Image: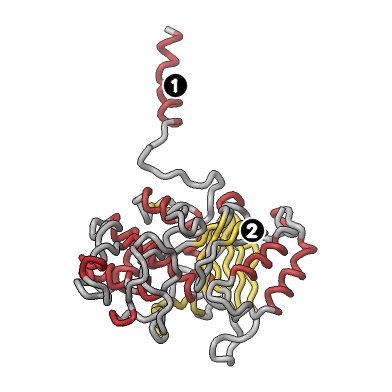
Amino acid sequence: MLRNAFLPILLIIFLSCAKDTDTPEVNSVSSYFPPKSTTEWDIISPESQGWNTAGIPELKKLLEDNGTRAFILLKDGKIVMEEYFGKNLTGLVSFNKTTNWYWASAGKTLIAFTVGKAQEDGFLKIQDKTSDYLGVGWTSLIAQQESQITIRHQLTMASGLDDGVTDSHSIEPKDLIFKAAPGTRWAYHNGPYTLLENVISKATSQTFDSYFKAKLTNKIGMDGFWQWVDNDHVYFSTARSMARFGLLILNNGSWNGEKIMTDNGFFTEMVNSSQQLNKSYGYLWWLNGKESFRVPESQLEFKGSVSPNGPADMISGIGKNGQYVSIVPSKNIVLVRMGENPESVQVPFMFLNDIWGKLNQIIK
């Protein structure tokens, strides 16, 4: 009788411990999520986290001296630091939490996520030929060469197209010329990347903007808009919206219990080394803590990590003039920085490293 009495209890324990293998693991520390329909966001103090607040003035000075306009740190989803400096793009109104700013190449991460959604929805497979969606002749290559380029090559910056043309941002066929076989050469090339939007549009039979909003921004309460700046389609939003996206990535594509991305395989691939040519690059995400990395406009391989001061598990969207959205799962932290140019390179690793040099003295 005693044994039979314990059977229901054992069954309950077993069921509560069983893991659904179709559900991705999320961070062990539960996250707060700001409401989607309001501007409310829970704020906590650095003191409440046991941080060394004596180091915060030096961090703020570093940020302000290097043209920062917005800086946000989330801990467990809540705002622990939120600072604004200087003027907005017009130079007339003080920068604040309602000011829109450009993401530059940090916005590549938005495209990567949207490609994953299109695959999840059955509209495409990343191993598909790009010409399946853009048609034959989207480059200047002969048909046999062009047919070897896949969506995955676009996601990994390994299309083999020549980034040394006069305008590497151009999406015109005349500027998309052969350099190497796809998958054999890594090069930070904006033209093939930008055409991923056209792939998504053709695959889904709707405008890129409408699909993007329906599948991402509307789901997590992001504001913002895409705007053409010369040959680049650039995303603009508030710093808080960038932080929302970072929080989504921190929670493995889930938002407050809703799985925004269910393609677990794509998500895992997106935030891990996507090829061996540049181990510090996923699907349009920069990865920290790898043994080597490459930089735009160079074929040199550099030993060590992209950001030696940063946590080894940090992944980042990094854009020109120091637009950063960085996610650190081990610390349950999201970092956002928007602003002016801290260093004259396409992908400013060094300033992000400098920020973490100060943060390491603060975060305990």
Q: Secondary structure at mark 1?
A: helix
Mark 2 crowdedness (10 Å alpha carbons): few <14, some 14-19, many ≥20: many
Task: Identify the residue under disc 1.
Answer: 9
Which residue reaches farthest right?
54
**209 left or right, relative to 350:** left
Q: Are marks 2 and 1 in contact (CB under 8 Å)?
A: no
Q: Image quadrant of residue 122? A: bottom left
Give the image location of residue 173, x and y in percent.
Answer: 28, 79
CA gap between label 2 and label 1 equals: 46 Å
Q: Earlier in the sequence, mark 2 or mark 1?
A: 1
Task: State whether residue 88 is above or below residue 46.
Answer: below
The amino acid at mark 1 is Ile
Give the image location of residue 128, x and y in percent.
Answer: 25, 59
126 vs 218, nearest the viewer: 126
162 vs 197, nearest the viewer: 162
**Residue 204 appearing in the image:** no
Task: Identify the residue under disc 2.
Answer: 310
Residue 123's disc is none
Quarter of the figure with the N terminus:
top left
101 vs 266, nearest the viewer: 266
146 vs 206, nearest the viewer: 146
The amino acid at mark 2 is Gly
Q: Residue at x 40, y 86 (%)?
A: 230
Task: State whether residue 125 is above or below residue 243.
Answer: above
Q: Residue at x 44, y 68 (%)?
A: 187
Q: Nearer the viewer, mark 2 or mark 1?
A: 2
Give the image location of residue 29, x and y in percent.
Answer: 56, 46
Give the image location of residue 335, x and y in percent.
Answer: 59, 64
**Residue 32 appearing in the image:** yes
Q: Secondary structure at mark 2?
A: loop
Q: Image quadrant of residue 225? A: bottom left
Q: Image quadrant of residue 22? A: top left
